[in-house]
Amino acid sequence: MIKTGKIAVIGDKDSVIAFKAVGAETFVATNVFEINDTLRELAKGDYAVVFITEQLAEIASDTLNKLKSRPYPVVIPIPSQAGSTGFAMNGLKKDVERAIGADIIFNDKN
Amino acid sequence: MARLAVNPTRMELRRLKTRLKTATRGHKLLKDKSDEMIRQFMSFIKENKKLREEIEKELPDALRSFVLARAVTSSQEIEQALCMPAKKVDIDMDTKNVMGVDVPSLKITPSESGDILPYAFPSAPYELDAAILKLSSLMRKLLQLAETEKTCNMLADEIEKNRRRVNALEYVMIPQLNETIKYILMKMDENERASLTRLMKVKSMIENRDD
């Protein structure tokens, strides 16, 4: 069964406004509680993808972890206009460590 | 290693032997599954890393040009220009099965109207046009990233779970079963020897009495 979903973007005002133009729904959040509330609300609705800026993802990483086990919505950290903090890359690194036991892909860096 | 608390009977022995066979077979299958999952995971994670690097380069760039556009006009004007998007993005949410894990598969439905810019040209600075075009060209890649990253996440989860199962079988179940089978065999041998000596003893006692 194929459903159709929407795209949501959570972030600071400067970063999310741009996504409004391309058809995503935008939510502005500043503190942990706002982020968690928004995420919970979005998880209930028919959203396919939730993009969240890395700065906010870092604050609310607990809630993000909870949403990891289910296929939808896909919550993905994206860099904000200030640039990447490396949070998402770290997440990838952790995945590799979890799956394989040692980091064999990202060890060329740092 | 602890053995199971069972009666040393022939029936129990047969039951345990079947269980051992099943466990060994399951262990082999799960191990094969783990190997294949890791192989798939590697290809996904490599793709994921490539996409992530590209996004990390391109997205802040696109967003920064928005900031630039905001700098040249008042933010109200920008908000006004953007508050009624011309495009509505719908995504087909499908699930794909990768090694028994349901992972999302996203497909963007092309929007009906061909126009990307949601405002009249004179009402916004041209920097905004460029920024929106840049961002909408990135959307497809962002979705691809979302799909791959989620797949990696879920595969990693599943690989970890699977490894636990394999280890539990290899280091707990199978040794335990082996131990118990050995115990039952020894117990039964012992019983047989005991009854044999008893018989011999009784026989000699009877023979002594007759003499």
Image: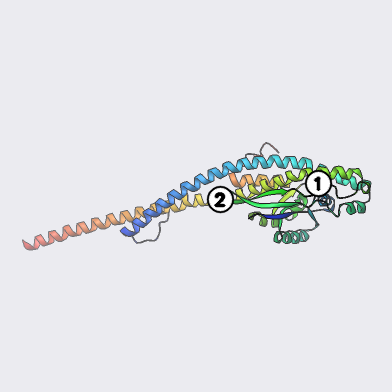
Element assignment for label 2: loop
Q: Which residue occupies the extreme left position in the image?
A: B211
* In this rendering, position of residue A66 left or right of residue A80: left
Query: What residue is disc 2 on?
Result: B100
Spot occupied by residue B117 in the image (x, y as percentages of width and height): 85, 47
Q: Which mark is residue B74?
A: none
Mark 2–mark 1 distance (CA, rounded to whole Å): 39 Å
Q: Which residue occupies the foreground of this view, B4 or B91?
A: B91
Residue B64 shows in the view: no
Spot occupied by residue B11 in the image (x, y as percentages of width and height): 32, 59
Colour mapping: rainbow
Spot occupied by residue B197 in the image (x, y as percentages of width and height): 20, 57
Instruction: Say which of marks 2 and 1 sits in front.
Output: 1
* In this rendering, position of residue B93 left or right of residue B25: right
Residue A10 versus residue A106 in the image, above or below: below
Q: Residues within 10 Å of mark 2 (few under 14, many from 20)?
A: few
Chain ID of residue with mark 1: B
Element assignment for label 1: loop
Q: Which mark is residue B114?
A: 1
Spot occupied by residue B27 in the image (x, y as percentages of width and height): 47, 49
Query: For the point 59% across and 44% down, which residue is it?
Result: A100
Query: For the point 71% across and 50% down, which residue is it?
Result: A76
Q: Do the residues marked 2 and 1 share a common chain?
A: yes
Residue B46 shows in the view: yes
Is tag 2's residue or tag 1's residue first in the polypeptide sequence?
A: 2
- Under mark 1, the amino acid is Gly
* In this rendering, position of residue A13 left or right of residue B140: right
Q: Which residue occupies the extreme bottom position in the image?
A: B209
